[in-house]
Image (cartoon, rainbow, N blue to C red):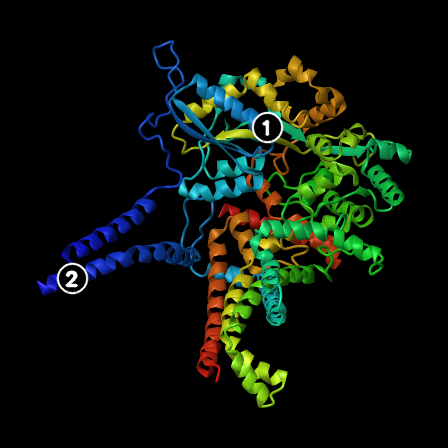
Amino acid sequence: MNKHKKLLSKITAFSFVLPAILVVGLLLLYPVASSIFYSFTSKNLIKTTYKFVGLKNYIKVLSDSTFISSFLTSLKWTIFSLIGQVVVGFTAALALEHIRRGKGFYRTILIIPWAFPSIVIAMSWKWILNGVYGFVPIALVKLGIFSEIPQFFTTKEFVFATLLFINIWFGAPLIMVNVLSALQTIPKDQYEAARIDGATSLQQFRYITLPHISVVVGLLVVLRTIWVFNNFDLIYLITGGGPANLTQTVPIYAYNVGWGQKQLGVASAVTVLLLVFLLVICAIYFRILNKLEKEGPQ
Amino acid sequence: MKAKKILSLVLSLLMLLSVFTACGTQAGEPNDTATAPASSAPAQSEGSSEPAKLSGDIIFWHSFTQGPRMETLQSAADAFMKQNPGVKITIETFSWSDFYTKWTTGLASGNVPDMSTAQPGHVSEMINAEAILPLDDLINSIGRERFYEAPLTEMTADGSTYAVPLYSHAQVMWYRKDLLQKYNLQVPTTWDELYEAASIINKGEGGAVFGCSVPMGTNDMMATRYLNFYVRSAGETLITKDGKANLTSQAAIDGINYWVKMYKNNSPSDSINYNVLDQATLYYQGKNAFDFNSAFHISGVEANRPDLMDYIDCAPMPTIKKGDAQTGYETSNIPMVIWKNSKHPEISKAFIEYLYQPENYVPFLLSVPVGMLPAIKEVVNDATFNSNATVQKFNNALNVISNAVGYGTAIGMEYGPRVEAGLITSQGVIESMFQDIILNGTDVQKAAKAAEDRLNELFEAAKE
């Protein structure tokens, strides 16, 4: 009887967990597994039949100079975006922490970019920086900073930097809000004790602030690395990867191959390579994070 | 305690069941399983003079996102449903780009509609994917001889016609009469004259109006379109008869050089990233002296700069040499198709036939006057059509475009529907080539050869 009760209890528990397992399986495991499977096939978006092609898709992708240049652009895009977002977000959080009045107001104002869909952000910036009617380029000429209307989206010198600026503007508030929350958890008496002991502001930052928020910043960096590396909409909507592939990242390359050329097998190989790369990066990040957590604030 | 355990078990089973139920409903499954049987019964029942009663639900996708066009189709559907109480037509509207993504991704899962509009390039891909039904019976029922021949040929493969032309338009040269007058210029008839006129206006206007914007954004097909204008006027094609890309012919190289020169001297720098809407907006706002488009420009200018309505007009496409006949127009014959997995093709066919009745068809065409030219010949003599104020005001444009429609085809479809035509306009290869020449200073011959090779690779890959 007791045995029967235990079995019933186990079935009940398992039944409660099973829907979650199924949902995770369908939404996460199935797409990943199907991508891996299709990456070894000649799967075409609109054709019903396909065949096994082994490593052909991987060889094709890795020997394509456009993929290599897209990968390097993605790396550049991720590294510079992250550095910019962390520096700006961190600085804004430290500044807000020291404001006595209107903290909530400023925090709300700065988080506004997250309230808009990407299409609105992309189209707004495209309009603001438009090389014919754009407010900013025309203002820069009127202020005498430029003699001709600067072309932010069409010249080699500006286009990548302009997209980076927009991405930093968009991403920094998230870092700011999270860092600000972490800053508010630091006991104020630690700063008082440090001041009594004669610690300078820099020393307070290095030995009190940084250890307390390093885990939060670390986690944000992990998340943002994945999001920024996979970022598609902003770049695609503003430049489409152009001009002359100057802003083409791996997700845009994968989209062009999968949806443009309809070669889903090849596009799957690209996404699998992307997945492997991001897993390696995340594993490195998590090692560092574990180390930071173990050290922790003293 | 025992009751609590049983309740827990029941609850958990219910949750489990809900997951299975959610997974069990297919996205494209029709919701009329209890009504009409899935047959393609003829509209007239055998051995009876009574028309067979139509019954069932169909989904109609179209890409007419503008209010008036959408409304006229909805009105026609409502009237059809009133006449056929057993029929339900659900209209879903997507922009052309969304529509393309929707059907290509939906095909694998069976999530495509019963009937839809299409672009000519789509039709060849749909035929290649064996996704649509041949519609010869429907066309014969409407009257094959009533349609213009060129659009039907464009939609015919292996002796079967797979789409019914709904309307046509052609790309022609738009200009500003006031600017030509201001600079004492004639309407250009050759490419060289166009360059000269654009340069004079560009210089004279000092950046307020550009001579001739050249759009090259990789997320559209505009540079391919512009190159095609030039190459077709030289009597050549961007895709050869045997399905190869043709960017290294003398006409293509001359065309590339021509548009690069035009971009550098008479176009806004920003146009290197322009898509069709960016380019059209420039003209709508009075910032572009010469442009290439269909008569949709009329409604665009009317909405943005009504004060310019008296100063816009169009002319035939320029030629290479003065006096040459221009026969290489790009036309778009927008058709309707019926999907193979439709459970009620008979309803779709009956509805399409109903749309061509004058009381439905003429108001539809007049929802964008002059923008949509009739696919059926006799409509040009229709009194209601001809009495429309815009049709009367832009009668010259109507004649120029009507003439162009008779000669042209879609890009790459000069030898009939083919998958290569879809690829040359959707991959941004020619756009990338132009950007590479302009931004990186790559040699034109070298860039053209690289783009040609790239396109041929894509053509081969599509056949695998």
Q: CA distance from mark 2 to mark 1?
A: 64 Å
Host chain of mark 2: A
The answer to which image quadrant residue B9 occupies is bottom left
**Neighbours of disc 2 within 10 Å: few (<14), some (14-19), many (20+):** few
Name the foreground residue: A170 vs A268: A170
Name the foreground residue: B326 vs B182: B182
Q: Seen in the image, is A193 located left or right of residue B230?
A: left
Mark 1 and mark 2 in contact (Cβ < 8 Å)? no
Host chain of mark 1: B
Three-letter amino acid code at the position of disc 2: Leu
The N terminus of chain A, quarter of image: bottom left
x then y, percent, for residue B254: 77, 45
The answer to which image quadrant residue B120 occupies is top right
Q: Is residue B371 above or below residue A216?
A: above
x then y, percent, for residue B174: 76, 33
Residue under pointer 1: B69
Residue A68 visible at all: no
Disc 1 element: helix
Farthest-out residue, bottom = A197
Farthest-out residue, front = A101
Q: Is residue B343 above or below residue B18?
A: above
Q: Seen in the image, is A42 located left or right of residue A254?
A: left
What residue is shown at x 45% (from left), y 21% (from top)?
A: B81
The answer to which image quadrant residue A248 occupies is bottom right
Residue under pointer 2: A7
Three-letter amino acid code at the position of disc 1: Arg
What residue is shown at x 41% (from left), y 49% (from top)?
A: A50
Disc 2 element: helix
**Neighbours of disc 1 within 10 Å: few (<14), some (14-19), many (20+):** some
